[in-house]
Image: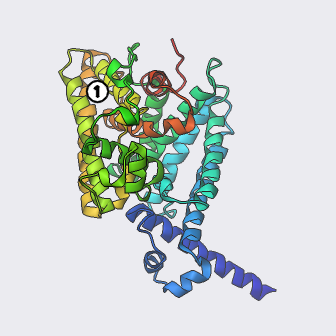
Amino acid sequence: MIGERAGTKRFNRRQQSILDAAAKVINRVGLGDTTLALVAAEIGLNLKSLRYYFEKREDLMVAAFLQSIALHQGLATEALKRKTPEARVRAFVHGYFALLGRVARGEQPAFTYFGDLRALTEPHSLVVYKGYTEFFRMVRSLMRPGIPQWDRGELNARTHMLVSQLLWSVAWIGNYLPEDFPRIADRFTEILLGGLAAGQVDLRPPEAALEKHPAGERGPLSQESFLRAATALINEHGYRGASIERIAAMLNVSRGAFYHHYEASEELVVACFDRTFEVLREAQSAAMLRREPGISRVASTAVDLVTRQMTVEGFMLRTSALTVVGPELRREMMRRMSLVTLRFQDILSDGVADGSVTICDLRIASEMVTAMINSAAELGRWVPGAEPEQVSELYVRPLLHGLFSRRP
């Protein structure tokens, strides 16, 4: 009996070390390139030994995600002990940054990031998405009763905002020392609850952002239409889901209609990212030329980009897709994305100077603007049926006026 218990403990310890190693590898190279051999090498095991614990790669991937989901659910459970929605959100944010601090100091193993969930295929994706949806519902409970006028769509949109802002923080938290994470959590929460705007802001979307062009009415097939369709499929299904056949079906053309194929997945992802970067850059450049208060320029850019993402024409590639490219190219892509964030920081700085932006940590604020735009592509998943003309109130207002702000 004692020997059996000791054997079980050894098995559980080894299994846990494999899960911890899988989290590191998935975060580093992406789900698509994570193999059992890579995970085994991470902790000095041979492949045969690892298969004793996880026979199939998919079993390990699912277990790694479910462990991360359970960890996040624990943070929500602890936050639910607070009495008010604001106190619960504050506790959840502080709990998350405390978790990041423990990982950064080596006091706790790394956890699997959720950015690559779309790379999972059925039936494994169904298991993980079920767990992730349960986590989402727990976070949604943090904000109840919230504002009485909220309908389910508004509550889901603000929950998505909260979760997305926290998950994006792993992209920039490395710029800070772990001992500063509690202060970062304070400043992050101030922006999240209080908003960026010092006064009311016009959130009406521009007419151009509301234009709809059904797939069969876009005119001649072009590289732009090809990349738009590819971007939509990568965002929804991961880069493996963006096959030539699927892109052709989405555009209602034959496979042979394409005069240029991106045979390598890395080449296709880079092309989609280049297009996304240009869309972001052009929107920012147009805003910077306008003679408006800083917050109005941030708002108009955000409303334009978030609204466009509710149509195929406006889809932008989520940064999670960059896990398919090599480390050196990925660093370059993220460097270019950081330039977008820095430009938002410049505009916000103008807003502080002219009094339209509340005094806040502009580095964190600019990251939160980028996170809002990057995560808008998934809004339709949580708010089915949301129309483009609605999304500025659903998703831009919470960041500009605060997570619990009321509609006018």
The reply to whether residue 170 is in sight is: no
Residue 148 lies, in percent from the top left, at 65, 19
Dot 1 corresponds to which residue? 348
**Furthest-left residue in view?**
289
- Determine whether, in the image, residue 389 is placed left or right of residue 330: right
**Furthest-right residue in view?**
1
The reply to whether residue 254 is in sight is: yes
Kind of residue at badge 1: Leu
Please tell me whether residue 195 is drawn above or below residue 100 in the rendered image: above
Picture quarter containing residue 358?
top left
* Residue name at image x 56 percent, y 33 percent: 383
Q: Which residue occupies the foreground of this view, 337 or 400?
A: 337
- Callout 1: SS: helix
Picture quarter containing residue 225?
top left
Residue 275 lies, in percent from the top left, at 26, 43
Q: How is the image coloured?
A: rainbow
Q: Which residue occupies the foreground of this view, 341 or 81?
A: 341
- Determine whether, in the image, residue 242 is placed left or right of residue 53: left
User: So how many labels did they put on this image?
Assistant: 1
